Amino acid sequence: MPNKKVRLLHIISSLQIGGAEIVFRDLLHQLGTKEFDHQVLYFHDGPLVAKIQSLSIATYQIKGLFFRYDPVFLWRFAKHIWQFAPDCIDSHLWAANVLATSIGWLLHIPVVCVLHLAASDEKKSKKNSLRSFIERWTTIKAPGLVAVSKGVKQEYVNQFGPSLERIKVIPNGINQDYVFEQSKKDTKFVKKQDQFIIGSVGRFIPRKNYILLIQSFAQLSRTISGARLLIVGFGPEQAKLEALIQELHLSNKVTLIIGKPACSYYPFFDLFVQPSLSEGLSIALLEAMSFGICPIVTGRDHSVIAHQYNGLIIKPTLKALIDSISCMYYDRPLIKRLGNQAKKTVNESYTIKKMATQYVIIFKTLKINSL
């Protein structure tokens, strides 16, 4: 008699285009339907809904009657979970983690909360103090806690204490076959022979620090005539970034690619720069590295990049950005060597298959322990 499938309910706050959402989609694809009976609950609509439905996985958007997270929302949320009766809940992103942990406790369903970014990474504010308070009594109580990088785990340990050493680190992985396939799609973008393309990918939000990147490029472009800056993304800071580009007279040298898939643009990049004030484990970074593109990231240390081995780690300052990008432009053997090592790093340690295998063990273990 064949083993019964694990009934696995996935809860995610958003199915917009973002790093956490993309790795969620790739995880579902890799897990497949042979061993799992999947359902997906989500709160914010987005283009990834259709992608998940194409995997023959049922998706359900939970809405409130008057506003998001109103009593009607909570009733619909609890009712759906009660009716599906999952063996295990897999949740992603802050709101989903809080609600999944709460309902899991009420209905005695084991929950795996995936921590993509620590709340303490964000700018300190009353809002984030409240988020931390809520997390203390919900998310971190989940039977299964997974951090996407050692850095995210350490942030939670620092914030909530040594009891969170129990967090398991499962690094994000990428579906390289899918990324390479998507990269072949025509973008209509033309790269001239003498151009040096500095690329970046991410949401247009303050944490990504794109204002600093554009300001540093303004100075670089005065001495490197062929330099061009290409930023792929979308978000609330779009108008501010466009105004800065106009103010610095960079319209012919800086291009914002709004709301388009990044995969098609990686082949044009000579260098990948991620100037973020904080990151979890960036899918865009892993994708860029898989093409053999040398990365420059900001911070004190990094869970993927080893300085001068498979990229550069620098301070998030104007001078550090200018100096490091200039160094890469003038030292082509170095940029090639770091790019090759970056590609090797992803091939060996950050594949979707390796990531999914570790999640399968957690889901099945929690099901057995709950019986």
Image (tube, rainbow, N blue to C red):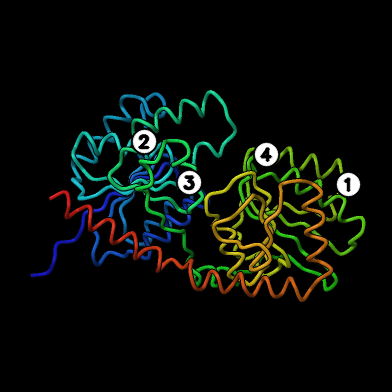
Residue at 85% over, 71% down: 194
Sequence-first disc among 4 and 2: 2
Compare marks 1 and 4 and give the one earlier in the sequence.
4
Give left or right: position of 166 versus 131: left
Q: Around disc 1, counting alpha carbons within 10 Å, would you say few (fewer than 14), some (14 to 19), or many (20 or more)?
A: few
Answer above or below: position of 187 versus 277: below
Q: Tell me what residue is drawn at x 42 percent, y 27 percent.
A: 133
Is residue 270 or residue 82 the one in the foreground? Answer: 270
Could you say where residue 261 lies in the image, as x and y percent from the top left?
A: 59, 58
Q: In whole angstroms, how far apart are the C-alphas of marks 2 and 3?
A: 20 Å
Q: Which of marks 4 and 3 is nearer the N terminus?
A: 3
Residue for badge 4: 237
Q: In this view, does 342 lie above or below 360?
A: below
For residue 249, the mark is: 1
Q: In which quarter of the image is the N terminus?
A: bottom left
Residue corresponding to mark 3 = 154
- Tell me the distance, in whole angstroms, between the alpha carbons under discs 4 and 2: 27 Å
Q: Position of residue 289 (x, y in %)?
A: 60, 67
Percent across and percent down for residue 312 are 69, 61
Q: What residue type is labelled 3?
A: Gln
Q: Position of residue 7 (x, y in %)?
A: 21, 54
Q: Which amino acid does label 1 sit on?
A: His
Q: Which of marks 4 and 2 is in front?
A: 2
In the figure, 28 relative to 166: above or below?
below
Check residue 98 in the rendering and tell me which mark sits there, or answer none.
2
The residue sitting at the left extreme is 1
Q: Residue at x 79, y 39 (%)?
A: 243
The amino acid pointed to by label 4 is: Glu
Sooner in the amino-acid sequence: mark 2 or mark 3: 2
* Lower position in the chain sequence, tag 1 or tag 2: 2
